[in-house]
Image (spheres, rainbow, N blue to C red):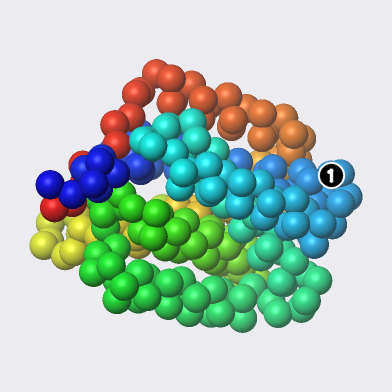
Amino acid sequence: MGSAYERTLSKVPQVTLVFWIIKIAATTLGETAGDALSMSLDLGYLVSTAIFAALFLVAVTAQVVADRFHPFLYWATIIASTTVGTTMADFADRSLGIGYAGGSVLLLALLLASLFLWHRTLGSISVESVSSPKAEVFYWVTIMFSQTLGTALGDWTADTAGLGYAGGAAIFLAFLALVLVAYFATSLSRTALFWTAFILTRPLGAVVGDFLDKPRDVGGLALSRFTASDVLLVFIVACILLFPQRPAAKAH
């Protein structure tokens, strides 16, 4: 029969349309909130990264020790991962001088290594298998790398590659559309498609967040980072309340 813990459902949500809507909103919030702390409050990238990293560790710990799926806790952890990803990527690019291209390559390698070790250790990287502490640790480490990679990739596409925020958003929306077509028209691994879409939603959120709060002379709307963050947070909370989420069924 196994332990009571092993018989529980996964502590992550089912992957539905609402999941992706909240995920994109959360990644956009991560960009605006990260910039609000590091730029608007002028705390700098290193201090902001330390603050968000501490919040992320607290949230992950709470998520791992929780006895079941809690939507607000789960999404709070996602938001914490994307805020620390924002400031960490900015710190690497602007303070350490690694550059978004170099940072993207490094983070992609770390992400792939995390997925490889996860699969090698537990035999599966599907969300349905996230029902043990070890799987959860792999899950959240992978997510942190993907969120940081997404920030670097989004900024590199919009700024360094010169596509601008609208062009960057169009590129990542097109890639997500291809993933959607592959989901319905091919037999490609659903797990691989999930992680591909999960990674791509982060740079989409990064360029949308920058579009909202960057100055007009560089193509943004120049909205207050705090106002944009508040609106996004209210939207996420409303989605969680209006569209109750179920935990993903545990893989057998």
- Give whichever of 46, 225 is nearer the camera: 46
Vertical arrangement, residue 108 with respect to residue 178, above or below: below
**Residue 150: in sight, yes or no?**
no
Vertical arrangement, residue 136 with respect to residue 77, above or below: below
Judged from this view, the residue extending furthest toward the right is 42
Vertical arrangement, residue 9 with respect to residue 169, above or below: above
- Give whichever of 216, 118 is nearer the camera: 118
Question: Residue 207, percent across and down?
Answer: 59, 53
Q: Picture quarter containing residue 224?
A: top right
- Give whichever of 35, 47 is nearer the camera: 47
Q: Residue at coordinates 75% horizontally, 51% vertically from top-left?
A: 51
Q: Residue at coordinates 49% horizontally, 31% vertically from top-left?
A: 72
Q: Amino acid at mark 1?
A: Ser
Q: Residue at coordinates 18% horizontally, 64% vertically from top-left?
A: 189
- Per the image, the residue denoted by label 1 is 40
Q: Is residue 242 left or right of residue 85?
A: left
Q: Is residue 99 left or right of residue 176?
A: right
Vertical arrangement, residue 140 with respect to residue 152, above or below: above
Q: Picture quarter containing residue 124?
A: bottom left
Question: Residue 7, percent across and down?
Answer: 21, 43
Question: Residue 75, percent across and down?
Answer: 49, 38
Question: Residue 252, percent across and down?
Answer: 13, 52
Secondary element under disc 1, as helix, strand or loop, is helix
